[in-house]
Amino acid sequence: MDWQHAPLDHVIDEIVGIHHARIRETAALVRCSLRNANDRWGGPASPFERTRDTFETFWSDLDTHLFHEASRVFPAVRSFLDESPQVVATPAAILPMMLRMEAEHEDVLARLRQVRVACAACPVAPPAPEWAECAELVRRLADHLEAVVTMENGVLFPRAIALEHVGATPDAAL
């Protein structure tokens, strides 16, 4: 689909319904895999425990970010797209929200890089198919996260910010 020209409601639905769902699903698998790896090969202060702890910090930040987007940011954009009588935000309030989300995206991507470095630092003694699976899950999570950040930063946010300059008409933000 050409997201640059799709209605913003559809862009938001794609982000929440597909991308956020994939991120949550994959993160749950990573958490389980890291727990299993730590139980099998880890212990206090082991590389596996450090990797699990690094991931838990990353996930806590990302989960909070996803919640904030779904509960505050996206409803704010929708509130004046559909000319709702209950306006959650004015178009002028969109720019600070989007800038904050972009900054959080940078922070979350930096934390994900830390997770990937921690994973790479774990010794993998053959045979360790579980650890290879965990590394693959982290890679898939990174792919999902990068896709949604690209869609939000490159499509949704610029178009939502444009509403501030065009009088909050959804068609004008295309």
Image: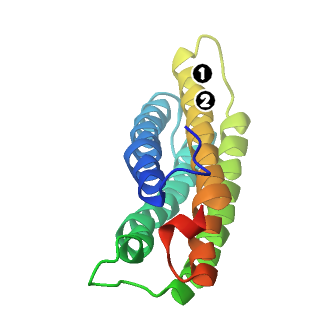
Dot 2 amino acid type: Ala
Residue type highlighted by circle 1? Ala
Give the residue at x 69% y 28%: 123
The image shows residue 158, relative to residue 143, as above or below, that is: below
At x 46%, y 27%, the residue is 40
Could you say where residue 76 lies in the image, as x and y percent from the top left? 41, 76
Q: Which residue is mark 2?
A: 135
Q: Quadrant of residue 96?
A: bottom right
Residue behind mark 1: 132
The quadrant the C terminus occupies is: bottom right
Q: Residues within 10 Å of mark 1 (few under 14, many from 20)?
A: few
What SS does tag 2 mark? Answer: helix
Q: Is residue 140 visible?
A: yes
How far across and how far down the image is residue 171, in percent? Answer: 52, 65
Horizontal and vertical percent for residue 1?
55, 37
Viewer-nearest residue: 115 or 145 = 145
Asked whether the residues under the numbered discs 2 and 1 touch, taking CB atoms below 8 Å apart as contact, a structural biologist would say: yes
Q: Secondary structure at mark 1?
A: helix
